[in-house]
Image: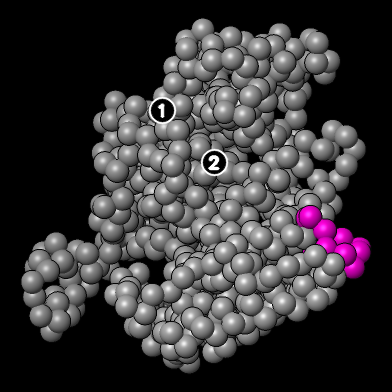
Amino acid sequence: GVVLSNMDYELRKAQYARDITYVTNNELGFDYLRDNMRYDLNEKSLRKFNYCIIDEIDSILIDEARTPLIISGPTEGNTKAYLEVNSLVSFLKECSKDSKTGDYPLEIDDLDGDYTVDEKAKRISFTAKGLNNLEQLLVSRGIISGSMYTDSNFNYVHYMTQALKAHLLFLKNREYIVGDSGVEIVDEFTGRVLTGRRYSDGLHQAIEAKEGVRVANENKTMATITFQNLFRMFNKISGMTGTADTEAKEFHKIYNLDVVVVPTNRLLARIDENDTIYYTEEFKFNAITDEVYKTYKKGQPVLVGTVSIEKSEILSAMFKSRGIKHEVLNAKNHSREAFIIAEAGAKHAVTIATNMAGRGTDIKLGGNIEHRVRKKIGTNVSLEEFQEAVKNERENYLKDYNEVKSLGGLYVIGSERHESRRIDNQLRGRSGRQGDPGRSRFYVSLEDDLMRLFAGDNLRSLMGKLGMATGEPITHSLLTKSLINAQKRVEDRNFEIRKHLLEYDDVITKQRDFIYAQRNSILEDTAIKDRILVALEEYLNFLIEGTKSSTVSNVFLNEVNSIFAYMLESLGSIENINSLDLKAKLMQIAKENLDEKENLIGRDLFNGFLRYEYLKNIDFKFQEHLANLDSLREAVYLRSYANKNPITEYKEEGFSIFSELIKDIKVSTIRRVLQLKLDSNSSD
């Protein structure tokens, strides 16, 4: 079977019931979350997870491991606040850095600005001076009145933090584009637009305010899961990819999977040349343009890989000025992807592409024969006519194929090293497929993000002394080693972040599993009235134990009154009654109340009503709980300054608020079903 995005739950259920089902990772994840938000057991589409084979497994379990799947709903937010703080960004200034080390001063008193920027972690931190300046700006412009530290005003610190992130750390045509539907996120690994995805925690609203498009309301998380935890629910997982070997350690530690390297079908004939390194990005781009011009004149097809839309457009402008005919493939013109890729291996073809032309793209030398035939005969022909046309075209195609092959095959040029070696290997792998000849080379500058953020601090000054500042390229063992070490450092750091995320996510996973198990149990329960009575007895016992006395306390009475309300009139005098006798009387009142309602509307209808109330309470309270856990996660991060382990703190407090959640769900449901008066004549 196969699951497609436009299928309803009945069709999905039929497809998942097959022995083998093909489905995208996103569809599977969202089906799991949707199934656990259903109010009817028959509407669930998935069955129990058993065995899963994941295509491009490193992309799913490593690249996308940090991105949670989220089902969200609209919430009332202060969208006006994002517009207000956006106008204040230019009034705040970044702290000065040491000109030699590029770091901020270690002493807090030496920080002379309003905030610091951590590019690696994508974090903005205010100084004490910055918070004071922000408060003055907000008050002087009438945005707030009184102190910024009151409950209603303190959110402006968060709004301002997100506004600064939007301006300084999230750049247009790199992290996102502005399209017809507003701000659209670009996947850093695939270069494609992530349709429907939004940054969380108000960041998307801050970017919308920055770009002058309509600011949408913030969303509330209703259900969430990461790919890591989704696929770890299977009894067994396996997968395939061309670039898993560099991440063998992570596959083993996180998923207990071993990586086995399978030899290529035919011997690799591609020549992978050493990196060419330049002092500045300008020198590098000029060198790429010269190299592409020389190769273009020869007729050899060239694929130039870039890390962002912005860089692809810069190179495109430079190619135009040199008269190099070329195509550009990025998230802005993804609709032409099939056409561009089909022509990318033809003679004289030059293609500039983001990571869209990386993983899974098959570029045929001489051009794609099927595409050539379609261009000649059109698409409105029978299968037999098409096959005959392919047969007739094959001779011309083979001639072009052999000509391109003799020119050296596809030449892949990387305009920058990606932070992950796997992404670079994916780009290289577009050339030299199935034993064809090919060539690849990466051009690097010391201004590239990878080198600037993660290479050694003294490298730039050393390269200046070696004469690179004049524009001459250099290849040196020290540079190659520094480049590889920089990539390994980033990969190790990203692994630690993913492992860190998993530790936090494990807390949510255990709680989510418990909640979803309870939901399933309620969906299957045909006697929820008994469940309600058991929950009430447990709660009354909890209250009695809390008083540590056989006499009835005021606390006990207040709680009982909030649950039973008008029903206490039938209780009579409680003077000199002990708590156990009172509990027995209350249980009798509750049972009579529920029995009366059941007799009024019928057992099945009443059971359905109780199920709906219970599940509605679970869903609403659990959504609030997820928001509380997000807030807790931010709060415990600061406790590391007090020499406390944030993970331990998160686990302990997370368990405490989860225990409170379970109690709250039961009490709210009991209160609702006992106090609600049913009318048998009602049409509802």
The residue depicted at 77 percent of the width and 72 percent of the height is 582
The answer to whether residue 312 is visible is no
The image shows residue 23 at horizontal and vertical percentages of 44, 75
Q: Earlier in the sequence, mark 1 or mark 2?
A: 1
Q: Quadrant of the C terminus?
A: bottom left
Look at the image and give the residue range highlighted in magenta: 543-555
Badge 2 amino acid: Asp
Residue at 84% of width from left, 33% of height from top? 641
Nearer the camera: disc 1 or disc 2: 1
- Residue 201's disc is 2
* Residue name at image x 90 percent, y 68 percent: 550
> How would you rate the neighbour count of disc 2 (Cα within 10 Å): few for under 14, some for 14-19, many for 20 or more?
some
Please state, as top left, top right, bottom left or bottom right, where the N terminus lies in the image: bottom left
Amino acid found under the numbered disc labelled 1? Lys
Residue behind mark 1: 80
Tell me what residue is drawn at x 71 percent, y 45 percent.
632
Q: Secondary structure at mark 1?
A: helix
Identify which residue, 522 or 347, lies in the foreground. 522
Residue 670 position by quadrant: bottom right
